[in-house]
Image (cartoon, grey):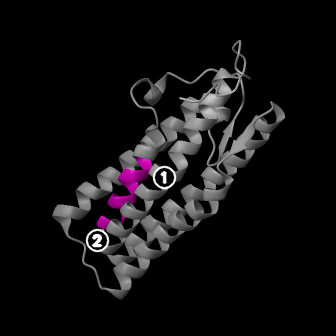
Amino acid sequence: MSLAWYVALVGATALERVAELVVSARNARWSFARGGVESGRGHFPAMVALHTGLLLACVAEAWLADRPFLPWLGWPMLVLVLASQGLRWWCIATLGPRWNTRVIVVPGLPLVARGPYRWLRHPNYVAVVVEGFALPLVHSCWVTAIAFTVLNAVLLARFRIPAEERALTLATTADRPGADAPGAGTP
């Protein structure tokens, strides 16, 4: 795969991100119209910066460090990138209007337990993690793969997943008796 094809792949990934933002904005309007509550706003700009940085760093490292395409690595990584996109859009389709790039939860709605959510609590983050190391490695951009993986792990583990878990716990216990008692909804 030439550098031009790799840049096209990263560009296609950027366009996919734009599509996600369009779906997310539409779904946010749906959620807010039904009493949706947003949580975790503080970490969202860092998440946007990290994901934008991933795309820019892929192209920059491939070009500036003259990273080669290694078929034994690049082709399997491309398969993982495509699989992660499939998983991401399966998550989006499964959650429907409840899916969002932000943490917006409509109180009282039950947790989704179909699609990939039958087996995984946060399958969309599996897609993010896989894509985060695989996309750079398509063109052997190992510095970007390591940097994104480490920073993303910190962001997910310390901020994003805890914010989402708290929001889901509060939203799914909001209509149970005693849910407004002190400590209700906390694990």
Q: Residue at x 41, y 31 (%)?
A: 120
Inspect the image, locate mark 2, and give the three-letter code of the amino acid beneath it. Answer: Trp
Give the farthest residue toward the top: 177
Q: Secondary structure at mark 1?
A: helix
Q: Residue at x 32, y 51 (%)?
A: 80
Above or below — where is 22 with respect to 99? below
Residue under pointer 1: 158
Pointer 1 local density, CA inside 10 Å: few below 14, some 14–19, many at least 20 = few
Residue under pointer 2: 142
In the rendered image, residue 24, in percent from the top left (x then y), is placed at 67, 47
Residue in front for this viewpoint, 179 or 5: 179
As for residue 134 lying within the magenta part, the answer is yes
Q: Which residues are magenta?
A: 127-137
In the rendered image, residue 178, in percent from the top left (x then y), is placed at 71, 15
Q: Is residue 88 left or right of residue 31?
A: left
Q: Is residue 17 left or right of residue 97?
A: left
Tell me the quarter of the picture where residue 132 sits. Answer: bottom left
Q: Is residue 65 left or right of residue 101?
A: left
Residue in front for this viewpoint, 36 or 13: 36
Q: What is the chief secondary structure element of the magenta stretch? A: helix
Residue in front for this viewpoint, 80 or 51: 51
Above or below — where is 11 with respect to 169? below
Give the farthest residue toward the front: 182
Above or below — where is 153 with respect to 63? above
Q: Is residue 84 left or right of residue 168?
A: left
Residue in front for this viewpoint, 82 or 128: 128
Which label belongs to residue 53? Answer: none
In the rendered image, residue 10, in percent from the top left (x then y), is placed at 45, 67
Earlier residue among tags 2 and 1: 2
Inspect the image, locate mark 1, and give the three-letter code of the amino acid beneath it. Answer: Arg
Nearer to us of marks 2 and 1 is: 1
